[in-house]
Amino acid sequence: MQVIFKTLILNNFKSHRDITVNFGERTDITGDNAEGKSTICEAPTYVLYGTDALGSKLDPTPITYEAEEIKVSLLLEVDGKELMLGRSLKKNKTIYYVNEVPSKAGEFNEVVEKLFDKDLFLSLFNPSYFPSMHWEKQRSMLLQYVTSPINKDVIKHMPDEQNKCLAALFKKHNLEDIKKIHAENKNTLEKKYIAAQSRTKTLQERLEQINISNVPLESLKAELAQIDKQVREKESLLDKAWEKNQAYNSLQAKIRNIQDQVEMSKEHWPLLKNEEIEDSCRTCKRPLDEESVTTVKKDKEIRIENYKANHEKLLKERAGLKAQLEEMEFIDVTELRNEIRELDPQGTPLREAIRIHGEFGRLQEQVKQAQTDENETLHSLNESIFILDCVKAFKAKEAELQGEKVQALFETLSVRLFEEQRNGELKNTFEIELDKKPYRKLSTAEGIRAGLELRDVLSQQSDLITPVFVDNAESITSFKQPVGQLIVSRVVAGQKLKIEGVDAE
């Protein structure tokens, strides 16, 4: 799109009561200070946005006189089609005009917004506007026309190891996700690695504190096995002796029991033997007949025979048990117990030595596993650190390539898009430099040249050609002809305001 200023009409605008400016391909505005040269630069932006050429709010009120209405009209040619825009202020009320037709603010703003972006237009019209914006806005505006290099183009400029690493990771995640994943991994693994080191050290210290026997483990086990064998053999003898003694004691108990029965039988015999045969009933005391007495006598005889038979049986049983007892032997196990008591403790130091051998072996395995875990954690940690370094290198290379693409747009200016932090990370920035001097330190002439080159780059990249206003042109001897309509303001001492529009021949 090409925008051309055709005619500017000022009525009671600041120092100008009534003036019409007919623009040519180049328009020279000359005159002494305070002749209203810069006001002409402010008028187009006032019509479009109600601001001065730097985007600040503008008060259009006449300076040295009073007026009921202030009005500014600008005739534009946009790609060959004319458009008349106007803005007036009457009794603090703003009236808008589109092709001389009064319009609402929204309708007017919609027409202007369809033409071009405000910041872009002001940057192209006034070379001093772009550097006045916040650096983030400057950066964003310039980079919207410069595509970032694609991942494939960036990694092919990186070392092979980093190239292979990122190429594999890019199949699953984007760069920011890769950074987040491995930044979190790094934090987690650093803590895990410290814990792993601590565990390895603790286990190693415990291992070093163990006083292990110089006697081989197999020898200790063999010696203990021999002692245990002897103990088991003696315990087996002790068990057998206990069984025999248990039988002996049991037989003795039976004999004592029968002996008690014999004694009880003896005590019962006199009572039975001397029992009298009564001739009367024990209950009713009536005399018994001869037959009953005979029956009573016979009962006593039977009971005596039974007693004798039972007594004899007890005596025989006692005699038989005593005969068995005489054939049995009660074994004294005192010596055997003493032998076991003396022998068994001999295995205690051997068992302790074997236990220490076992603990030492377990600790060795734990130390080995802890070292393995520590090494694996360190490997994973180093892997995440390497990936983060790859991400950092990728961003640096991406910034370098993007910077080269941006720098290729300029002839004399250099543009800094990034600055390196202490941690090696790149931080977004934006600095325009001329001969290594930042824009803010340039002289007026250098600033004009830098601004014109910058606005020409923006014009070319955005495909928008607008008029450009060069103020204070007297401070610069020459400058490259910018793209688009040129409006030049120059101070000429003692001269009244003079406007000359020149078209190409």
Image (spheres, rainbow, N blue to C red):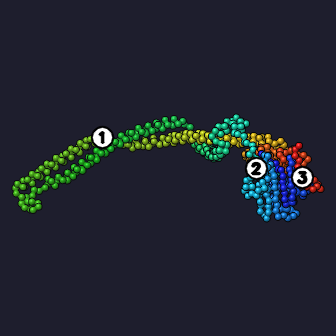
User: Residue at horizontal 6%, vertical 53%?
Assistant: 294
Residue at the far left: name it: 290
Q: Secondary structure at mark 2?
A: loop
| Residue 454 x, y percent position in the rendering | 81, 46
Q: Residues within 10 Å of mark 1 (few under 14, many from 20)?
A: some
Can you identify the residue that label 1 sits on? 328
User: Residue at horizontal 79%, vertical 61%?
Assistant: 89
* 378, 79: nearer the viewer: 79
Whichever of callouts 3 and 2 sits on the residue coming sooner in the sequence is: 2
In three-dimensional space, the C-alpha distance between marks 3 and 2, rounded to whole angstroms, equals 27 Å
Whichever of callouts 1 and 2 sits on the residue coming sooner in the sequence is: 2
Whichever of callouts 3 and 1 sits on the residue coming sooner in the sequence is: 1
Amino acid found under the numbered disc labelled 3: Ile
Can you identify the residue that label 2 sits on? 116
Q: Is residue 57 above or below residue 215?
A: below
In three-dimensional space, the C-alpha distance between marks 1 and 2, rounded to whole angstroms, equals 129 Å
| 171 to the left or right of 341 | right
Front of the two marks 3 and 2: 3
User: Residue at horizontal 69%, vertical 42%?
Assistant: 391
Q: Which mark is residue 499?
A: 3
User: Residue at horizontal 11%, vertical 50%?
Assistant: 301
| Residue 103 x, y percent position in the rendering | 74, 57
| Residue 167 x, y percent position in the rendering | 66, 37
Q: Is residue 342 above or below residue 293?
A: above
Front of the two marks 1 and 2: 2
